[in-house]
Amino acid sequence: MQPDARPEITHYTYRVTWSADDQEFVATCAEFPSLSWLAPSQVEALLGLEGLVQDVIADMAEQGEWIPQPFADRSYSGKFNLRVGESLHRELAIQAAEDGLSLNQYVLSKLRAA
């Protein structure tokens, strides 16, 4: 993202979970994996992290650094390349044929089940 284009902080991918080690809720952001915020409630953890993300984005913009675009605002083609070894490729092709599926359909069914 352009240094001067600031994304909406609520569009980022947040997760709030309980930390047994800290005995508090911890909020994390997928686009900023090095950031987290601890708080006694889920709401406080999320709000604290959103404020931190906003501060980090402001600092990055001021420094002319690249600002990650929220996953929710990115476009996806639906395609990605995956390299596997020859033996795994053969094994997957055989399993797909035995199930009466194309290799693409077979791998997609396995990804959905995961």
Image (cartoon, rainbow, N blue to C red):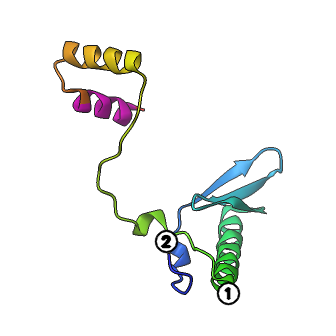
Dot 2: element: helix
Q: CA distance from mark 1 to mark 2?
A: 21 Å
- x and y percentages locating residue 59 in the rendered image: 70, 82
Q: Is residue 40 above or below residue 78?
A: below
Label 2 crowd bin: few (<14), some (14–19), many (20+), radius 10 Å = few
Q: Which residue is mark 2?
A: 11
Q: Which residue is mark 1?
A: 62
- x and y percentages locating residue 94 in the rendered image: 26, 13
- Left-right relation of 39 to 75: right
Q: Which residues are magenta?
A: 104-113
- Left-right relation of 18 to 90: right
Give the residue drawn at x 37%, y 34%.
111
**What is the three-letter code of the residue carrying label 2?**
His
Observer-side mark, 1 or 2, equals 1
Task: Please identify the quarter of the rendering in which residue 4 is found.
Answer: bottom right
**What is the three-letter code of the residue carrying label 1?**
Glu
- x and y percentages locating residue 70 in the rendered image: 49, 68
Label 1 crowd bin: few (<14), some (14–19), many (20+), radius 10 Å = few
In front: 47, or 5?
A: 5
Give the residue drawn at x 51%, y 84%.
5
Mark toward the start of the polypeptide (1 vs 2): 2
Give the residue drawn at x 20%, y 16%.
97
Image quadrant in which the C terminus is located: top left
Give the residue drawn at x 35%, y 29%.
110
Judged from this view, the residue extending furthest toward the front is 86
Dot 1: element: helix
Task: Please identify the quarter of the rendering in which residue 9 is found.
Answer: bottom right
- Magenta-drawn stretch contains 55: no
